Amino acid sequence: MTSPSSYIIQGILAVLQEKQMSTGAVAKLMGRNKKEIKQILSGQLPLTVDDLSTFATKLEIQDADLQRFMPQLDNVQTEALQQKVEDSQTLHLHDEDNPATSDHDWTPDPVGVHSEQALRLGFSLGCNLFFVVNTKHLQNSGVPEQTLKQFGDKLPIRLDADFFHHYRPEYFEEGLEIRLSFDAVYTCFFPWEAFEQITFFVDDDAPTATEPSTSKPTLRIVD
């Protein structure tokens, strides 16, 4: 049976997805270590009452954000409900503003638009991204003309995961709309055919050795 803290963590993760915030951005916002935040949200460290209060304050989490992940308070938990909970813990990639994708779970499509799928995955994982676009497709893209001339045929763009929520990516049938900073902030549009390379910079931590705790007792969410 899934523990209460697991439902709460699932709700927090959903809020992060909606706000397009990475664990690094949350760590900076909370004044905590990124590795520690990842361990809490992955269930490796306990979610304390203090942690939950800080998450709620910094991320402006409402009761309704968490309640949608809590199970119905029936005396008997049906198999259907158990399956629903298990499915909710699986990473789903979708565009909330696009009914065509928001109603269905996203799965990789070998014959679909590769660049769109790769970018959706990268933003959802919250890892730093790097992509290269061919500038011959960037006429009227919103990218400053001086920048296009500076880089010639290939324009490299690196996206810091800590600022994903500022980029505000939107996916359209023809391409990606995103806010980027050059000499100022520009809303740019990159057609899918312009993408030539998309690279992920993963950041996985080594397992933490278990050591006797010397810290003072804290309140935690009881499973």
Image (spheres, rainbow, N blue to C red):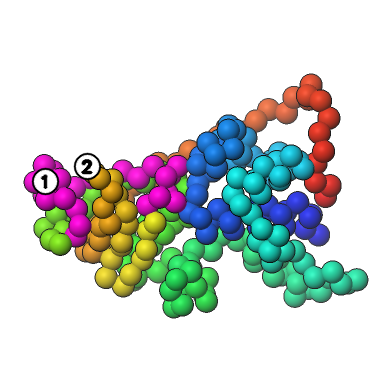
Q: Which residues are magenta?
A: 141-167
Q: Is residue 104 above or below residue 36?
A: below
Q: Pointer 2: residues within 10 angstroms few (<14), some, or many (20+)?
A: few
- As for residue 55 lying within the magenta part, the answer is no
The x and y percentages for residue 18 are 52, 59
The x and y percentages for residue 78 are 81, 74
The x and y percentages for residue 201 are 40, 41
Disc 2 vs disc 1: which is toward the camera? 2
Label 2 secondary element: loop
Quarter of the picture holding the N terminus = bottom right
Q: Is residue 168 above or below residue 110?
A: above
Task: Describe residue 207's horizontal placement relative to residue 75 as left or right.
Answer: left
- Please name the residue shown 28% across and 57% down the image: 187
Task: Describe residue 144's horizontal placement relative to residue 128 as left or right.
Answer: left
The x and y percentages for residue 28 are 53, 36
Q: Amino acid at mark 2?
A: Asp
Along the line of sight, the residue nearer the viewer: 97 or 158: 97
Q: Is residue 1 visible?
A: yes
Q: Amino acid at mark 1?
A: Gln
- As for residue 161 lying within the magenta part, the answer is yes
Along the line of sight, the residue nearer the viewer: 131 or 108: 131
Q: Is residue 132 above or below residue 217?
A: below
Disc nearer the start of the sequence (2/1): 1
Give the labeled residue for mark 2: 183
- Please name the residue shown 79% across and 21% down the image: 214
- Please name the residue shown 65% across and 30% down the image: 208
Are the residues flagged by discs 2 and 1 in contact, CB closer than 8 Å?
yes
Give the labeled residue for mark 1: 146
